Image: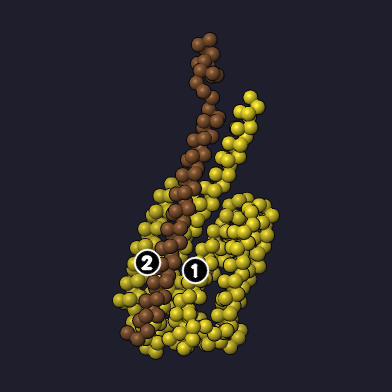
Chain colours: A yellow, B brown
Amino acid sequence: MGRKLNNVLGAVTLALMVVALWMIFAWVPTEAEQGIVQRIFYFHVPCAWVAFAAFAIVAVAGVFYLWLGGQIWDDLGYAAAEIGMLFCTLMLLTGSLWAKPIWGTWWTWDSRLTTSFVLWLLYGGYLLMRAMLEESGQVARFAAVVGIVAALDVPVVIVSVRLWRTIHPAVLVTRQGGHGLQDPRMVVTLLVSITAFTLMFAWLLMLRLAILRTRTRLDEIARAIAIAEFRAGRA
Amino acid sequence: MDNFGYLFAAYSAIFAAIFLYVVFIWNRQSRLDDELRALEAKLDTLTVPPQGESGPQSGKSL
């Protein structure tokens, strides 16, 4: 049942991604000032959206793990952090590829870029810690706390373009209010792309959670085998 | 078509990264499934008593 749902979700994601690509490269008009390279925007923003959503899930799962306990919350936080890290990396990479032709540099220590990089470092540390330490209740509790604290950077990244002087454009919500997209087709394309990325995130999260569940089942069976072998040895 | 290379690089990077991640997940899942099947088979041999040693049928035969 779970695997069938995963396959359906994967197929729907793929179909919507094809639609989004068609809209980006064949339907939406080219932006007047930046030209064709502005089309990076339609995947750059969804990458950021998925990364922020994933890190918010890490924080919520962390709160529930500390409050209620339960392996599912720890698994959810771990899986969401890994996927969030993937999309945060893609957000930084696509941003850099967009910045070079527009700003004339791959990177600048601008407030939006710096806070995003800090977010990447924080969750990089979270994943490194989980990979290096042996899984235990103590590590899971510590990871939950780190996941919650690191997520506090997400709202800072979002409001950084308003709090400090920055060269990063505030397109979705401009400093004057409203959005900065010139054509309604740009808004529709962005929304379709965000929906496709959100479905992809849900699909990847389910695949990743299935691995963690299988690992838990393996541990249970390994324990049952050890007990059965001990009993057989005594008999 | 100015800056097409940057656009191509950005989209290629996204699809390559997601594709590799999905392949990585699928490989890991199939490896764990194999391991799970092997351990379940081992557990079955340890917990199911051999026929004829116990159970109601063996009792009747006695």
Chain of the residue under label 1? A
Chain of the residue under label 2? A
The residue that disc 1 covers is A87
Task: Indicate the position of residue A58 as horizontal and vertical percent values.
Answer: 59, 62
Residue A140 left/right relative to A11: right
Residue A95 left/right relative to A233: left
Task: Indicate the position of residue A136 as horizontal and vertical percent values.
Answer: 66, 52
Identify the residue at image location x=40%, y=68%. Answer: B15
Task: Indicate the position of residue A7 as horizontal and vertical percent values.
Answer: 39, 53
Task: Indicate the position of residue A26 as horizontal and vertical percent values.
Answer: 30, 76
The mark nearer the N terminus, 1 or 2, is 2
Identify the residue at image location x=49%, y=58%. Answer: A205
Can residue A39 be spotted in the picture?
A: no
Say what amino acid the circle numbered 2 marks.
Met
Residue A24 is marked as none
Say few, some or many: other residues with alpha carbon within 10 Å of mark 2 (under 14 / 14 to 19 / 20 or more): many
Residue B46 location, quadrant: top right
Determine whether B36 is above or below A134 in the image. Answer: above
